[in-house]
Amino acid sequence: MRDAGRDDFVYFIAVPTRWMDNDIYGHVNNVNYYSYFDTAVNRFLIDRGVLDIQKDDIVGFVVDTGCSYFKSLAFPDAVHVGLRIGKIGSSSVRYELAIFRNDESHPCAAGHFVHVYVDQRRGLSVPMPNCARALFQSTLEVAASA
């Protein structure tokens, strides 16, 4: 996804860097990129009405993540996380994400994030809720028509 541009993503969230995000080398530490991914995915789900963190019995648990780094970020850069749906399974979804610095057109980092839907009470994988499936499918269709 190194060559992906902003137009390749259907949802964006802005996340400010913080002074404490910088490490001893003067750039945002790699662990923060995963936090940006997590924030973007969950904000997307909340904004689209398919996640109520206080009430839902069935939620997505992270089972796989990955990130490739291309350029450094540093405080006070503005981070823009782009999200698209990569794959929909029966109980899982793969999000593809890219982190853009300020107004740059190519990402500083790109990665993926996989949720498996789980019944929290039983701790078992379950089929994805219909509302989530519909959202992911419509997001795929928007991306395909762009």
Image (tube, rainbow, N blue to C red):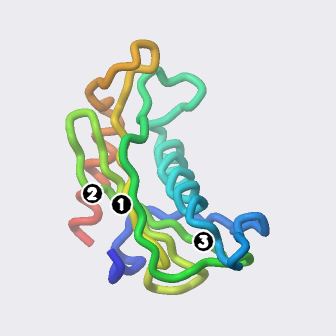
Task: Report the residue that reaches farthest toward the right.
Answer: 19
Which image quadrant for residue 139? bottom left
Query: Where does residue 69 sit, x and y in percent of width and height?
Result: 46, 74
Which image quadrant for residue 36? bottom right
Amino acid type assigned to the residue bearing label 3 in the image: Val
- Badge 1: few (under 14), some or many (20 or more) residues near its Cα, within 10 Å? many
Question: Disc 2 designates what residue?
Answer: 86
Q: In which quadrant of the rendered image does the C terminus lie? A: bottom left
Which residue is located at x 27 percent, y 57 percent?
Answer: 86
- Badge 2: few (under 14), some or many (20 or more) residues near its Cα, within 10 Å? some
Which residue is located at x 68 percent, y 78 percent?
Answer: 25
Is 58 left or right of 71, judged from the image as shown? left
Question: Disc 1 designates what residue?
Answer: 96
Is 69 left or right of 79, judged from the image as shown? left
Of the numbered discs 2 and 3, the one sitting upstream in the chain is 3
Q: Are marks 2 and 3 in contact (CB under 8 Å)?
A: no
Local secondary structure at mark 1: strand
Amino acid type assigned to the residue bearing label 1 in the image: Glu
Task: Report the residue that reaches farthest toward the top.
Answer: 122
Query: Where does residue 100 sit, x and y in percent of width and height?
Result: 51, 76
Which residue is located at x 33 percent, y 83 percent?
Answer: 3
Question: Disc 3 designates what residue?
Answer: 79
Q: In which quadrant of the rendered image does the N terminus lie? A: bottom left
Q: Are marks 1 and 2 in contact (CB under 8 Å)?
A: yes
* Residue situated in front as seen by the camera: 22 or 12: 22
Which residue is located at x 26 percent, y 33 percent?
Answer: 91
